[in-house]
Image (spheres, grey):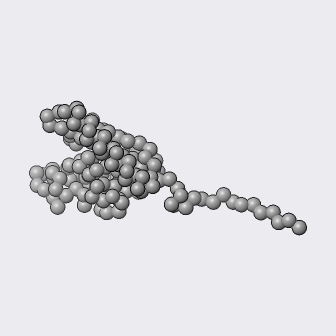
Amino acid sequence: MEKSSTTQPQKPSEAEARKKAIIIARTRSVPHDSARNQVSLAMQKRHGEEIAAELGAEVIREYTIVGGTTEAAVQVAVERVLQTLEAEDIVYLITSNVSRLTRRTDTAIRLDERLKATGARLVTDADPTGTGPTLGMVSNQGAPNGRRIS
């Protein structure tokens, strides 16, 4: 008598599942230099893609921004990134440095809270696995009161 067997579809292991990542690159040259900005953005994106590959993540979106962190267009772009993280199952937000998102301590704290709520990991050159504390990478950035934090 033949045995019949049915196999249930198995969920892929964490190693097999493709993790999603977003890369954010931002630059600002003073005085404004388009060629320099484009080189900086390309380098940040390429480095982000390398990190994503090392983490086994698929880059589903790249944001490139030219301008300072206090400019409205930059703040709108960062907000869009956060909304994407809140709406989709993204594992990694990859950027070269927290300063690509903000240089203000109060804004970094709010970003950190929202990022933690999504479950996504912030991956930077200082923390290439995204396992460290987000605010730990904000050191030596300008604080709103003009003092440096550490």
In the foreground, 121 or 114? 121
28 vs 61, left or right, is left
Residue at 45% across, 49% down: 58
Residue at 38% across, 42% down: 62
135 vs 115, left or right, is left
Where is residue 33 shown, x and y percent of the image? Answer: 19, 33
Above or below, 59 against 36 in this view is below
Q: Quadrant of residue 148?
A: bottom left
In the foreground, 57 or 106? 57
Where is residue 4 shown, x and y percent of the image? Answer: 81, 63
Q: Quadrant of the C terminus?
A: bottom left
Q: Quadrant of the N terminus?
A: bottom right
Residue at 66% across, 57% down: 9
Above or below, 122 against 46 in this view is below
Q: Is residue 117 visible?
A: no
In the foreground, 12 or 114? 12
Q: Is residue 16 visible?
A: yes
Where is residue 5 shown, x and y percent of the image? Answer: 77, 63
Q: Quadrant of residue 132?
A: bottom left
Q: Looking at this view, name the residue that lies furthest to the bottom.
A: 1
Q: Quadrant of residue 69?
A: top left
Above or below, 2 against 147 in this view is below
Q: Number of marks in the image?
A: 0
Residue at 19% across, 58% down: 139
